[in-house]
Amino acid sequence: MTGDYLPCAHVVELLTDYLEGALDPATTARVDAHLFDCEPCTTYLAQLRTTITELGTLPEPTLPADTVIALEAAFRDLHPPHGH
Amino acid sequence: MPGAVLDRTIWAGVVVTERGSRYPGVGMDVQSGPVEAGEENLVDRLRAGDGAAFTRIVRGWSPAMIKVARQYVASHASAEEAVQETWLAVIKGIDRFQGRSSLRTWVFHILANIARRQGTTESRTLTTSPVDDADSGPTVDPNRFRPVGDRWAGGWRAEAAPRSWGPESAALNAEARVVLTAALAELPQRQRMVVELRDVHGLPADEVCGILALSPANQRVLLHRARAKLREQLETYYTGPNEPAVRP
């Protein structure tokens, strides 16, 4: 499948689309086939996944606790629980 | 909370980022209804005065809202104010919510209006970066690949191919996380917003498109560029800068 060869330089640009399921089935199959026997691209993808996972663990600044308490009070005032 | 596991728990039809709780229903403040409950259910709960549901979305969505607001206003404190004001508007307006968008998209829409107005009064100059120069071109240095004319043109050069980050690469060490945080702050604004909303805050693609007014394809381009750059910074930290191509 010489004409079908996806160079690594191209594959690395497709990986977010690949992870998002945004590639058409034929291209997905070509990326799968490439990753199957390309160790560096497999490493690249694993490192991209690690990056994504770690981003999800970074601290997220949120509202101060007293602000949340004030909002909860405002919610209760306007929307008293129904029933009971 | 270093090392906390990120869980994206489907709850009431929205994806809520949970930290420190591995499984839906086991976390500290996870007292949700059935996992498959629809968003209408969430709106109904709010209208019915379900304080736990309200607390949950305030906790779950406010961090990303602060990020979005920060685009428009001059300080973190102003961003917090905009978020607080947004929640007050949501409390007052939930009965009028039409359900034409998702509840979260609606909340972020209110937020954008409030923060924009607040930003104007603070006369913050908004950088309207239409298209970043950094939004085109390859994300990996072309010198790392075999040149045109080579039988394997576009394949990694052996000496420049990505190498393993070592046994701890599955979870980054504390120093690498500092590198990652710094690299995030250095990204062009649009890339940073997309990767923060998607990967840091766990919002789904379609909502990020709605919040930032991006086409799905454009959203993916920005996301990929951001991720590729962050990966590269981590690579530099773990394996040193890549050796320049050997020129004959």
Image: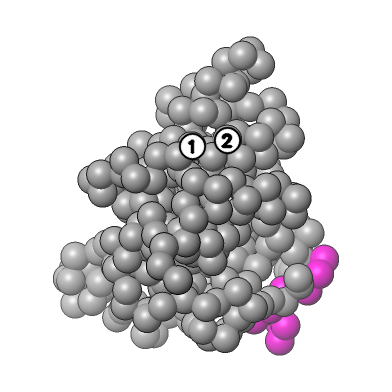
Residue at 45% in and 71% down: A84
Q: What residue sits 75% from the left and 50% below the top? A: A66
Asked which quadrant contains residue B81, the reply is: top right
Q: Which stretch appears magenta?
A: B161-175
Q: How far apart are marks 1 and 2 (CA)?
A: 6 Å
The residue identified by callout 1 is B89
Examine the rendering and report whether any part of residue A15 can be seen: no
* Image quadrant assignment for residue B47: bottom left
| Position in image of residue B157 (x %, y %) | 53, 67
What colouring method underlies this structural image?
one colour
Measured as percent of width and height from the top left, residue A49 is found at: 52, 72
Q: Nearer the viewer, residue B231 or B239?
A: B231
Please report contact status of discs 1 and 2: CB closer than 8 Å, yes or no. yes
On the picture, is A81 further left or further right than B241?
left
Q: What residue type is labelled 1?
A: Ala
Q: Position of residue A47 (x, y in %)?
A: 57, 72
Quadrant location, the N terminus of chain A: bottom left
Asked whether B184 falls inside the magenta stretch, the response is no
Camera sees residue B194: yes
Q: Where is residue A71 in the image (x, y as percent from the top left)?
A: 62, 48
What's the amino acid at mark 2? Glu
On whether residue B164 falls in the magenta region, the answer is yes
Residue occupied by mark 2: B85
Relative height, residue B133 to residue A60 (above, below):
above
Query: Is B102 in front, or is B43?
Result: B43
